[in-house]
Image: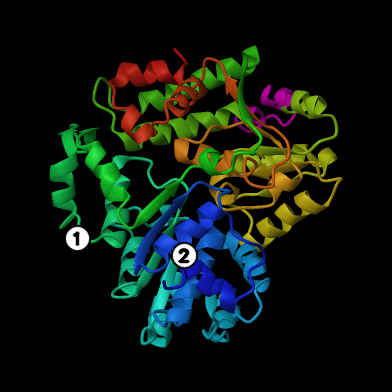
Amino acid sequence: MSELPYEVVKSHFTLPFELYPFQQDIVNVLSPLPRAGYYAQPGTGKTAMSTASALYKKLKGTSEVAVVTMPPILIKTWARWLARIPGIKVTQYLGTPKARAAIKLDGDFILMSIQIFKIDHVRIMAELGHKPRVLIVDEATAIKSVASDNYKKTREFADDQELMLLTGTPLSSPADAYAYCKLIAPTIYRNLRTFENVHVEERDFFNKPTKWQNLDLLADNMRVNAVRVYKRDVLKDLPPITYTPIFYDLSPDHARLYKRLADDQVLKLKDGGKIDATQATALYHALQQIIINFDVFAQDDTLLSAGYDIIEEVMDEIAGGKLVIFASYRMTNRGLVKRLAKYNAVAAYGDLTSVQQARNIEQFISDPACRILIAQPISAGYGVDGLQAVCSDALFLEEPVVPRDFEQACDRLSREGQRHGVNVRIAIALKTCQVRLHNNLLAKDALVNSVQGSYQDLRDAIFGN
């Protein structure tokens, strides 16, 4: 009997730890495949499994180099992990154009952001295009749109080569499945039109799908050359996670300001007409920023949103513990950093470079005096590891519009290594758009598919009716 892939890897490389049996099984099943989807929930070891699979491919000669694309904040995490494996060379391909030009693309693993992968695609293809290679796409949601440059560059680099897609949340809408299937099992659907003919049942006025069909078939097709792993099925000892909505009222002056500004926004829409998802989403984004940033919109630095009272109450409740605050907007993050300095708060959001974000996350993990991490779900909610070692409490001040972002953010704490029950608190300002956003999240449904009503329907949602 031939040796299993995981045993082959172990006989040549010293991994930092023994993989769990379920992880070994996945490596044994997927690593021999030229294309595979590792659709494993955060905290179940996608990095370890894909690394073992890449090493197997290297030993078998099907891949000479592994190129790993990812959100920039994850590069240091990947580098630290790979540094623990003796005998492999890791190249971090990052920095300014001048700095990158001086970096040789000669590692066993070459780590880079998806943005740099696109910007330097010509150079990367020129230097690596002649080598057998595997492309590992971490947080593969970045390539879910077949119209995006992310997808096109990924497809070009992986043409006739090995490919691994890593993501804990492969779908936010059935439409996303086509990109994954086309890359991992390209013969299932001839093209996008074929996919839509099979799975789209109804469309709206804007020709966007509103009702799907044959979803059982779609689920089966997503499992071709792929494995889906649910955290609770394989990590039996993982502490429970509790979600607690905290409903609160804005002050009377704040509520009046919200209503006035909301009225102004609604009046910009066409009276009585259909509202497409793009307009609805933009409206939600505009209005949700008013809720925490009372001082900014009132142009009075002395005015604070009642959301800050929620923060103080939670900090009292956790009695010296650490808290991750999730807020979606840069304006909010800036204000939180300024006003929570007494807790030595640090942040990871879009205003900061990936290096600064990584440094701040490390400070939150290592510095007992740093009690609050202010995190933007898109910046720090994907792939970040280590928070679970020091923190089990989270507070959402602004709910992500996409449920996928909410789930990923929660999984920064609810993952392997967490020793305590995780408490996720969700602050919901009554009579605002957050009421509808919360209901959407509870329904596990993306806003793009749930808001297709008339003018009055959306207006009711804005005011929490």
Tag in front: 1 or 2: 1
What kind of residue is marked 1?
Thr
What is the number of the mark on residue 187?
A: 1
Outermost front residue: 1
Identify which residue is drawn at 32% across, 55% down: 180
Image height check: is 148 above or below 403? Answer: below
Regarding mark 2 in the picture, which secondary structure is present there? helix
Any part of residue 174 in sight: yes
Classify residue 141 as left or right of residue 209.
Answer: right
Residue 184 quadrant: bottom left
Front residue of this view, candidates 427 and 329: 427
Identify which residue is drawn at 43% across, 26% down: 440
Is 78 included in the stretch rendered in magenta?
no
Q: Position of residue 120 (x, y in %)?
A: 44, 76
Image height check: is 248 above or below 274? Answer: above
Classify residue 89 as left or right of residue 276.
Answer: right
Report the span colored magenta.
294-310
Image height check: is 140 above or below 157? Answer: above
Q: Position of residue 231 (x, y in %)?
A: 53, 42
Q: CA distance from mark 1 to mark 2?
A: 26 Å
Any part of residue 116 in sight: no
Q: Position of residue 69 (x, y in %)?
A: 48, 66
If you read the primary sequence from the N terminus, does the residue marked by circle 1 or circle 2 appear first? 2
